[in-house]
Amino acid sequence: MNKKITFLFFLLMLLLAASFLPSSIWAENEGFVSVSRLDYEIFHAPENLRPGQALVVAFRYRGTKPVADQQPLMLNFIDRKFFLEPVAGGWRGVAAVPLGTVAGSYQLLIKFDDGAELALPITVLAHDYGEQRLTVPDEMATPVRPENLQKIKQDRKSLRLAYASSGSDLLLERVVRPPLSTTITSPFGRRRLLNGKPKSPHGGVDYKAAVGVPIVAAAKGRVVLAEELYYSGNLVLLDHGLGIFTLYMHLDEISCRCGDVVDFGQIIGTAGSSGRVTGPHLHWGVKIAGVFVDPLRFVTDSKHLLRVPWEGEDGKSKF
């Protein structure tokens, strides 16, 4: 009897301890969910999403009729378009849920060039990232000077062109890793009030970093922007293909140029306090086809882009 009570007590303590584990630990065990639509087998991960999260999709044809004249064009999710890339035995892509998306069921659409569509319901869960109040110089919170407004206008044009440069070929060769391992001073997704006025939610994570600390690329990518912007300060923007970008903001120095292809772990600049900041730090962000996603969650979710849910001929389950 005592042994049974001891076992039950141990089991209860184990379950309680597990409930306090970080969500990323559970996420490591998440796999692809498989469904069938017409003659296609569709896989996606994770099963449920929250605003500010990526959705990796892979699918293959399982029918008997030739499909040479029916090719997938794109993914469409929550009124946004996302790239598809042909891979061994099928196709893959990555979509994303914008911050502010109301909880509910949304249709993921795989669109073909002949007008056909495959539809898959995806559940988006509610999630509150909290709120943050900051004080910055008035001209940084709400610029009014003509020269600053002109600079912001030019910056937006530069960013628009840079984001439009991504292609449908994935450059990732390994799981995305954070550029720093220091303390996070401001997490992703918080609603921001600057000098008491509502602004856009925080589109990345802020890492504590003294001026001059080396900053490395989180993954292999192509430099599509490396210059000083009004709000972002010295910025490096890396394109990783499939519409996936990583951003490194408020740098002191930039040590790469547009057009460079940088490898994972390569130094691209140093931390600083340029742009709209309250002190030196690194802002690191991930953007997918115009949607900011939680960079730390994408560190976990990016592993799904490096494996195929069906086994290849080599038996290694790789694209």
Image: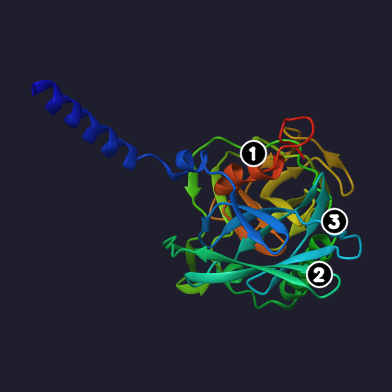
Q: Secondary structure at mark 1?
A: loop
State which quadrant residue 108 falls in.
bottom right
What's the CA distance linking mark 3 and mark 2?
19 Å
Give amino acid for label 3.
Gly
Indicate the colouring scheme.
Answer: rainbow
Q: Which residue corresponds to mark 3?
A: 167
Under circle 2, the secondary element is: helix
Residue 179 — which label? 1
Pair 3/2: label in front: 3
Instruction: Determine which residue is flagged by label 2.
Output: 157
Give the mark, 1 or 3, whose residue is nearer the N terminus: 3
Q: How far separated are the C-alphas under marks 1 and 3?
A: 23 Å
Q: Identify the amino acid type marked 1.
A: Pro
Q: Which element type, helix, strand or loop, lies under badge 3? A: loop
- Compare residues 291 and 91 and report the one nearer the observer: 91
Q: Could you say which quadrant of the image residue 220 lies in?
A: top right
Q: Nearer the viewer, mark 1 or mark 3?
A: 3
* Residue 134: image location, x then y, percent: 47, 62
Query: Can you name the residue that lies furthest to the top here?
Result: 3
Q: Is residue 112 left or right of 9 when viewed as pictured? A: right
Left or right of 27: which side holds 292? right
Give me the residue at 72% from left, 71% from top.
Answer: 148
The answer to whether any part of residue 12 appears in the image is yes
- Seen at 67% across and 56% down, the residue is 42
Q: Position of residue 287 (x, y in %)?
A: 68, 57
Residue 300: x and y in percent read 58, 42
Q: Is residue 299 above or below residue 157?
A: above
Q: Give 248 or 250, whichever is nearer the viewer.
A: 248
The mark total stands at 3
Chain-order first, disc 1 or disc 2? 2
Identify the residue at image location x=49%, y=39%. 183
Q: Is residue 23 above or below residue 68?
A: above
